[in-house]
Image (cartoon, helix red, strand yellow):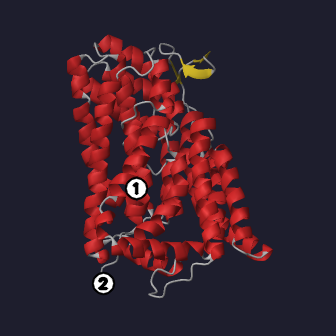
Amino acid sequence: MKTKFSVNTLAMIYGVVVLVAIGTWLLPGGEYKRVEKDGRTLVAADSFTPGATVPQGPAKVLLAPIKGFVKSVDIIVFLFVIGGAFAVIEKTGALASGLKRLAAFFARRPHLRIFFIPVTMVIFSVAGSVFGMCEETMPFVLIFIPLAIALGYDSLVGTAIPFLGAAAGFAGSTLNPFIVGIAQRIAELPPRSGLEYRMLVWVISTVCITAFVMLYAARIRKDPSKSPVFELDKLRKHEFHLDADKMEPFLWRHKLVLMVFGLSIFALVFGVMKYEWFILEIAALFFTLALTAGFVGHLSLDELTDSFKTGAKDMVGVALIIACAKATLVIASDGKILDSMLHGMAMAISQLHPIVAAQAMFVAQGTINFFVHSGSGQAALTMPVMAPLTDVLGLTRQTAVLAFQFGEGWINPVLPTSGVTMGVLGLAGIPWDKWFRWMLPAQIFFFILALLLLIPPVVMHWQ
């Protein structure tokens, strides 16, 4: 009998940590000097000094995930709280009752269902493009998965709507302060410069990723057994009581829970846009949501605390994966090979034709993104090197910023070392190997698209 190959994600990520540690024994070392500028630590472009690596032995490899856990504690706490809050909401019964009514609403109005995916994905893409929505997509994954299943799709569609929608916006960033804003500032470009071409890129990016999800969703709705997560979603239907024909009673306490939930989502968007809330503030909001939903949903104190602990406990495996993912950066940095990799790529790019050089910058940014997943952190590391390199090559610095945002937006959604990607997949309960195989055709397409979209800026000498 033929058996299906399945990847143990935690073991795979730790294997990557070991490989990076081996790299510290084989690759040349070196380091850039760091300087403080405008309250940000940047590398000094011409300051690279070759030096010996610091080989990371077995003891360092064992210590790295612990350091990775400490460095990722904010996002791990965030996941614990999100998992606990949604477990409380699910315990009240409001989610199952509300979803069945929503599914019945669309069943009576099938002409409206066609707008569900494009409208919601455009909203998330705008959020990614304008204010850099990334980690903030995590709570929405837990909303859209049961919603997608109730509408006849699967959990891949439910995950893709917020996550890939925001990623398309990230790749086509227009006003995103964490990508375009910081990168342009480091590259000494005027704020909002080059906006017209970026808007075109955003339209292309959003249309293409939305079309990919819609075509897949139509195929799955026609034949659900073709879904890579078909067996997983059968369990989910039972979990959300969506496999029973009986309509759950929609009590006043259910309505109050959903009203509180809706107000919390509104508060999340308002807080992020108005007060620049980030992970800790959003975690506090969802902790408040859990307490309030438990109260208005008539849960006893034991039911509330037990369901919250169960939801948080389900995130332990995700937390370990994120810690190991962060450990790759710990090993590469401590081993003194991260800066030398950046320097080596910059030297190789400097020998290329301008069009190929711009495309190679995108590849280099995607490679560095394997280790550094913070958009602002990657900008601080790479842009002081890449921006002056464009002057030598006869490219514009705007082109270097575009290559950077492509590497951040179109590579991140499949990286197993990305805390956000693995956090999203952990919340969704989707194994990384299934997600990767599903995303691979789109990933190849967007890789080629990025290479093509980098040609006009070189030809036009885009400013």
Amino acid, disc 1: Ile
Could you tell whether 19 is left or right of 221 in the image? right
Residue 267, horizontal then vertical, whole percent? 62, 49
Distance from disc 2 to disc 1, alpha carbons, whole Å, reads: 36 Å
Residue 63 visible in the current orientation: no
Of the pair 247 and 131, the residue shown nearer to us = 247
Give the x, y percent position of residue 113. 33, 65
Secondary structure, mark 1, is helix
SS for callout 2: loop
Residue 82 is situated, as x and y percent measured from the top left of the image, at 62, 59
Please identify the quarter of the rendering in which residue 454 is found: top left
| Mark 1 Cα shell of 10 Å, populated few (<14), some (14-19), many (≥20) | many
Q: Nearer the viewer, residue 54 or 8?
A: 8
Report crowding for label 2: few under 14, some 14 to 19, many 20 or more residues within 10 A (C-alpha). Answer: few
- Outermost residue toward the right? 301
- Residue at image coords 56%, 72%: 95
The residue that mark 1 highlights is: 161
Residue at position x 35%, y 28% from top? 402
Compared to 255, does 336 lie above or below? above
Foreground pick, 98 / 448: 98
Quadrant occupied by the N terminus? bottom left
User: With 84 as the anchor, is 119 left or right in this view?
Assistant: left
Looking at the rendered structure, the number of numbered marks drawn on it comes to 2
User: Is residue 73 in view from this perspective?
Assistant: yes
Name which of mark 2 and mark 1 comes first in the sequence: 2
Q: Which numbered mark, 2 or 1, is in the foreground of this view?
A: 1
On screen, residue 133 above or below 283 = above
Image point (49%, 19%), residue name:
185
Q: Any mark on residue 1, and which?
A: 2
Q: The residue under label 2 is which amino acid type?
A: Met
Pick the front one: 79 or 389: 79
